[in-house]
Amino acid sequence: MPRTPIRDLRDHIDQTVTVCGWINALRLQRKVQFVILRDATGMAQVTHKREGEGDELEQVIESLSDEAAVAITGRVVDNPIVNLGGVEIIPEHIQVLGQAEPSLPIDENSGLEHRLDWRFLDVRRRPASRLVFDVQTTLEQGMREYAYGRGFTEMHTPKLMGTASESGAEVFKVGYFDRTAYLAQSPQFYKQMAIAAGIEGVFEIGPVFRAEPSFTSRHATEFTGVDAEMAWIEGLDDVMAFEEGMLAHALQKVADVHGDEIAKVYGTEVKIPAIPFPRVTMAEAIEILRDKGWDPEHQKEDLDPEGERGIAAHIAEQTGHEFVFVTHFPASVRPFYHMRPGGRPDLTLSFDLLWKGLEVTTGAQREHRYDVLSKQAAEKGMNIEPMADYMNCFRYGCPPHGGFGAGLGRMLMVMLGLDSIREATFLFRGPNRLTP
Amino acid sequence: MPRTPIRDLRDHIDQTVTVCGWINALRLQRKVQFVILRDATGMAQVTHKREGEGDELEQVIESLSDEAAVAITGRVVDNPIVNLGGVEIIPEHIQVLGQAEPSLPIDENSGLEHRLDWRFLDVRRRPASRLVFDVQTTLEQGMREYAYGRGFTEMHTPKLMGTASESGAEVFKVGYFDRTAYLAQSPQFYKQMAIAAGIEGVFEIGPVFRAEPSFTSRHATEFTGVDAEMAWIEGLDDVMAFEEGMLAHALQKVADVHGDEIAKVYGTEVKIPAIPFPRVTMAEAIEILRDKGWDPEHQKEDLDPEGERGIAAHIAEQTGHEFVFVTHFPASVRPFYHMRPGGRPDLTLSFDLLWKGLEVTTGAQREHRYDVLSKQAAEKGMNIEPMADYMNCFRYGCPPHGGFGAGLGRMLMVMLGLDSIREATFLFRGPNRLTP
């Protein structure tokens, strides 16, 4: 018999159906056995009146444990008294498909690390852990729709690199037959290679790896990056316009599909951001922040997390907007391949996107002129020889281009108001965590 | 001025437009200069009559090289004589955005490895190299649509593992702070963990890593896997039905969007496969093959590439179908976690999907009962202790489930009739190739 989702039971009153799911709870009373069954679509009450000796069903129910996986065939009965949807199932047959040990290793009081050790049970039993992945699916779908709609090509660039990209710090080394490979910290060089390959818009959602011994709530050693890169731009604004358009589209979709459930489970509203997002230059941001007492010794060139929260709070106060692009970071704190505005070699055509005070994206226009790029690399004291394949991309007609890299987990974390990136990742990886 | 795609020039007759692209060819005659400009949508002729001294445009054109990236502003003129769409552009301004060195490192006679060294130029200039990624984008889009439509959740599982999965052979080792991590050979264990987490359909497109020193046309050390896993299945047929439905849907989409161009560029027809795909058990396949002289010594338990081609040829002859599911492989050649049919512990509920004689997918129903799974692992001489996190998934109610893993590059290779997986990958990785 085909399976009926619990959500649809009301359409099958007085019919016999099969539902499949996990035992959410058992209430075994003297005269009646109640089974609360849970599937991905909801919960249902299964009600069996004990018949005593020879009642096989009674014995099967008696043998169940919480979280056992079962298929229950029975009649759907309208019963307004039942809390769960006003229906109950009168079982005719119960098949135990996956038995569960009687005592579960985590419960509602378990701490985060303990929950992560038993992540499959955490996600299965805790709606706040589970809903993240439905939202992630919709968010990605929305972002891809937007990129596809603009003719972008979805690429899969290598995670194994022959040389360490950029500085070589914070890169994992891989034993590669008789030599060493490196895990890509980002698809940066490769998506630019795709631009040089004549692919005018590049989109990739995939893993990136950071060998950083960071233990904050927002860092992971492996996370899912959302990367885009686009050719023939006239300037940085084209890149920011793409990103804000993509996010507004995707958040609209998330709000439409999951808004109510997100409000219920996390107490958070998914706001559709107005376009354009506020923009503030780094110079303006620093002035605003110093007025409020940030960096009293005037020594910081870059925003620290406190500065990010400060500027976001300021913009939220002024505009009510959750997002802000901070632009034109100093060249000293940005990589050599960021383009610099004419006449201001100390600045870059770059941005960070802050969402509710957390950096969720870094972007820039890239320097596409071989001679200028070489000079900028030399100024940073970099040896371009190991990057020959990258540098070659600029020798045979590379168009102006720019793009960004965003963290999928960070976006989910901010959107849903989660305490840690660990909650926004199915199986978190950090310096001390390689399991499960 | 906003950019006009070359494909749309005909809509702008007698208007002034800006087109951006690469110099495909220059024909500099005594009286007239012809520039053939190429963008992602087509090619256009730009015609400039030399005016002699003081003609700045003439000098700019004279300075161009093949593949320079330029923006050309000019008037679109109807001219039936022009091969490229019957229009030409009379330039008013040419801006050189990315200069190109005068001689290109590859040409139409370059061999595959040399082309791969200069992959960005290969993809930019060679339609057969370029179209792959448009097709890939549409193929993925089609597969995701199908999975989304069935309520599947898109997951990103870790590529960094704390212990080597399965046998530990063919796994890359990663230096991970003061210990060793391993690169995932497949998301197998993690997508099963997602099933155990109550996610009833799991879908992932992402990189997988194989430390195999294979140099064939169909192996890579890193490739893009398409993985699905689904809960509450009644048997292997549910898994095969999902995959054939997904492929038929995605191929329909590819044929609709790119069918004509694929025929033109590769001389290949994208056939929409009829559903259901033919199915043949391994035992039947071996019988068919031995009748034709394969494995005269009756020693093979598994299909080799010759056997795969043989059985596919037989099915194609009998049914005209390009696909065939070969099912029920012997337990001896399948991993411990494949479920075995009742009463036949020597067989597995598994399949390979062959497409035009090449294996593009491996799938199975998984053993979800802890005790049976432990026994099967022990029979294979495996130590389950390092796999404790995986084994734990089966202790607290795991539903029956199954799934498959397909290779994206292999599918493209077969669909387009490419000679090698190298041609179906943007930046190929093999034992001897970690660049560009």
Image (spheres, coloured by chain):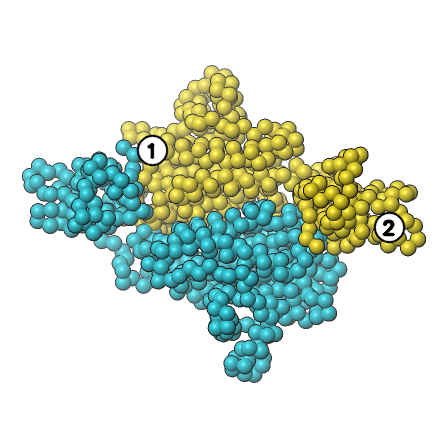
Chain colours: A yellow, B cyan
Q: Where is residue B105, by image quadrant?
A: bottom left
| Residue receiving disc 2 | A58
Question: Which residue of the protein is positioned furthest toward the right in this rendering?
Answer: A53
Which residue lies at the image location 53% right of the left edge and 66% below the top edge? Answer: B324
Image position of A21 (left or right of A53): left
Picture coordinates of residue B135 (x, y %)? 41, 53
Q: How many neighbours does mark 2 have within 10 angstroms: few (below 14), some (14-19), or many (20 or more)?
A: some
Q: What residue sits right under mark 1 in the picture?
A: A235
Q: Position of residue B224 (x, y in %)?
A: 49, 54
Quick one: SS at disc 2?
helix
Amino acid type at mark 1: Gly
Report the front residue among B378 and A347: B378
Residue sitting at x 68%, y 46%: A5
Residue A164 visible from this viewpoint = no
Tell me residue B35's x, y (percent): 19, 47
Q: Where is residue A61 in the image (x, y as percent from the top left)?
A: 83, 49
Q: Is residue A316 above or below residue B387?
A: above
What is the chain letter for disc 2?
A
> For the N terminus of chain B, which image quadrant?
top left
Q: Of helix, strand and loop, which one carries label 1?
A: loop
Q: Looking at the image, which is closer to me, A34 or B158?
A: A34
Instruction: Tell me the chain of label 1.
Output: A
Q: Which mark is residue B430?
A: none
In the rendered image, is residue B69 in sight?
A: yes
Foreground of the two, A377 or A102 = A102
